[in-house]
């Protein structure tokens, strides 16, 4: 996650989803997987500001706060989100993901687990999403991804929700490929996906996800108006 994207449409959907899930999970452990800002605006979208009549009604408080952040009325710092309580009962791990040779990735995850222990759900927010074959942990680009062994260690503790940017691939086939990888490489038993036009949120668990059925059904109904599907 880069702070430069705070308050955009992906953020709105992310926090809306987490606010709804918190009613089921209690404490949510949020691992931001921060990376330094750059000069790019790739992926920054503001559909929620272009169509307020569709988004604001979903969660007026959330909409107003993120609108302020997006327009620069509030300081772009991750701790601000904790201070204003956008995600009820959340615990945050706010360290930058270390590049190979600069810091220890293992130490990053040990620190994360010590902060978010006891959470009923863990949220991972990498820049791009889950690992890809062309980028090993030794690559400088590894900071953009979460790896399946890292997901697996968290799945031993609680269900995990993972942010995933969609590449230019056929969407249904890509989602099924990622679900299969989560099951085969991270040990997930069940995976559900909240799918937007550009990104997905993969909810994985080592047990069934029955506890989330009601809230996922509610999300499917409330978000259909803004083109979001739950699969």
Image: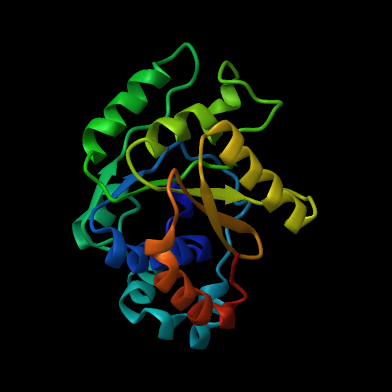
Tell me the quarter of the picture where residue 44 sits.
bottom right
Residue drawn at (51%, 35%), measured in percent from left and top?
187
- Going by the image, does 197 lie left or right of 23? right
Q: Position of residue 121 (x, y in %)?
A: 34, 50
Q: At which x and y percent is residue 108?
A: 35, 25
Give whichever of 5, 1 is nearer the camera: 1
Count of labels in the image: 0
Rendering quarter of residue 69: bottom left
- Locate the C terminus and report the quarter of the image it occupies: bottom right
- Residue 151 lies, with reference to residue 21, above or below; the image says above
Q: Is residue 103 left or right of residue 229?
A: left
Which residue is pictured at 80% across the width and 55% down the height?
A: 170
Residue 142: x and y, percent?
56, 26
Could you say where residue 7 lies in the image, as x and y percent from the top left? 43, 62
Q: Is residue 217 above or below residue 144?
A: below
Residue at image position (24%, 62%) is 88
**View extreme (right): residue:** 170
What scheme was used to colour the molecule? Answer: rainbow
Q: Please state which of residues 60 and 110 is positioned toward the viewer in this rendering.
A: 110
Q: Residue furthest bottom?
A: 53
The answer to whether residue 147 of the structure is visible from this angle is no
On the rendered structure, is 177 left or right of 142?
right
On screen, 198 above or below 180? below
Q: Nearer the viewer, residue 108 or 21?
A: 21
Q: Is residue 27 visible?
A: yes
The residue lying at 77 percent from left, 50 percent from top is 168
């Amino acid at each position: 996650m880069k702070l430069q994207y705070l308050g955009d449409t992906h953020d709105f959907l992310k926090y809306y989803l987490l606010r709804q899930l918190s009613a089921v999970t209690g404490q949510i452990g949020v691992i931001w997987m921060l990376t330094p800002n750059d000069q790019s605006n790739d992926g920054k979208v503001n559909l929620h500001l272009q169509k307020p009549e569709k988004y604001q009604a979903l969660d007026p408080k959330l909409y107003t706060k993120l609108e302020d952040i997006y327009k620069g009325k509030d300081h772009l710092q991750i701790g601000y989100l904790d201070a204003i309580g956008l995600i009820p009962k959340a615990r945050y791990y706010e360290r930058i993901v270390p590049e190979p040779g600069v810091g220890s990735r293992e130490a990053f995850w040990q620190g994360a687990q010590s902060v978010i222990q006891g959470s009923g759900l863990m949220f991972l927010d990498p820049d791009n999403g889950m690992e890809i074959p062309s980028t090993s942990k030794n690559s400088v680009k590894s900071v953009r991804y979460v790896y399946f062994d890292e997901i697996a260690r968290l799945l031993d503790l609680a269900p995990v929700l993972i942010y995933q940017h969609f590449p230019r691939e056929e969407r249904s086939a890509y989602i099924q490929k990622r679900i299969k990888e989560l099951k085969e490489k991270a040990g997930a038993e069940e995976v559900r996906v909240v799918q937007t036009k550009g990104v997905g949120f993969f909810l994985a668990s080592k047990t069934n996800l029955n506890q989330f059925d009601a809230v996922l059904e509610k999300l499917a109904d409330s978000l259909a108006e803004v083109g979001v599907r739950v699969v």
